Amino acid sequence: MSKELHPILKGMIPLVDGIASTFGKNCEVVLHDIRRPQSSVIAIANGHITGRSIGSPMTEYGLATLRKGQFDKPIVNYRKKTKDGKFLKSSSLFIKDEKGKLIGFLCINYDISELTIARNIINDFTNIIEDTDFDEDSGESFGSTVNEMLSSIVNKTLESVGKPVAFISKEEKVNIVQTLDQKGVFLIKGAIDYVAKVLCVSRYTVYNYLDEIREIINE
């Protein structure tokens, strides 16, 4: 059979094993000679995936592709399913001669069945409740000491305002204190004095902000 092959197809036969060896046992690589649809497979690696071998016929999908006659672009990353239930990620590359005439297909079928199962397990395991008061995008504040944690929370809250403390209005300072209160900062001993120092106000002013906030909430 090899003597009858087009030289270009014959030269591509070593690529079949090379590609399959690169991507492993789950990667089936098939080289088709379109002149003989009834026995188009002229080279194949990891044929256990679809149960084919040299001399096997072209698939239904391959025949339909031939019938359409559209070979300008390769068909990549489409999904197929084998009769025994394997899920395949497939690509079909068109091989043409020096005159641009189609002479063969190079098809890659990657068995993603195990990966699909693993993805479903990972998706299930990493599923999280979206309805939460915690803003995950802001990042968690981890500190080796209470002071480090307190400093981190306060600094991130100030950064969200986007201006130096000297230019922050009283209303913005009240909002900052309210945000820190919601984050539980004032449950930490010494937090009132620390926040007062950062905001350049007295500790009594911070207490007044808190009273103002709680009055609004209770109205």
Image (spheres, helix red, strand yellow):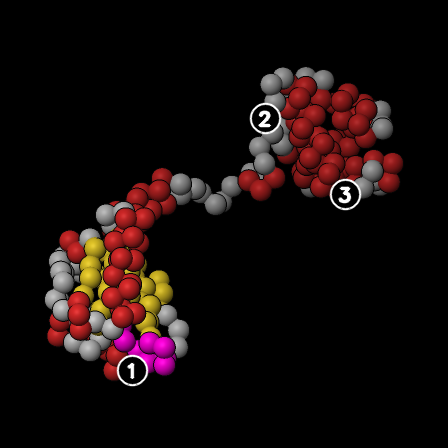
- Residue nearer the viewer, 208 or 54: 54
Quadrant of the image for the C terminus?
top right
Q: Is residue 218 magenta?
A: no
Distance between the alpha carbons at the discs numbered 3 and 1: 59 Å
Distance between the alpha carbons at the discs numbered 2 and 1: 60 Å
In the displayed orientation, state which residue is furthest to the front. Answer: 3
User: What residue is pinned by disc 3?
Assistant: 162
Judging from the image, what secondary structure is the residue with disc 1 in?
A: helix
Q: Mark 3 Cα within 10 Å, few/some/many (few <14, many 20+)?
A: few
Horizontal relation, residue 99 to residue 48: left or right: right
Q: Which residue is depicted at the point 20% across and 59% down?
A: 44
Horizontal relation, residue 88 to residue 143: left or right: left
Tell me, yes or no, if residue 62 can be seen here. Answer: no
Judging from the image, what secondary structure is the residue with disc 3 in?
A: loop
* Disc assigned to residue 68: 1
Q: Which residue is depicted at the point 20% across and 78% down?
A: 35
Q: Are marks 3 and 1 in contact (CB under 8 Å)?
A: no
- Residue nearer the viewer, 152 or 79: 79
**Labels 2 and 3: the sequence-earlier one:** 2
* Disc assigned to residue 142: 2
Q: Which residue is depicted at the point 23% across and 47% down?
A: 25
Instruction: State whether residue 201 is above or below residue 16.
Output: above
Q: Mark 2 Cα within 10 Å, few/some/many (few <14, many 20+)?
A: few
Report the span colored magenta.
Answer: 97-104
Tell me, yes or no, if residue 151 can be seen here. Answer: yes
Distance between the alpha carbons at the discs numbered 2 and 3: 22 Å
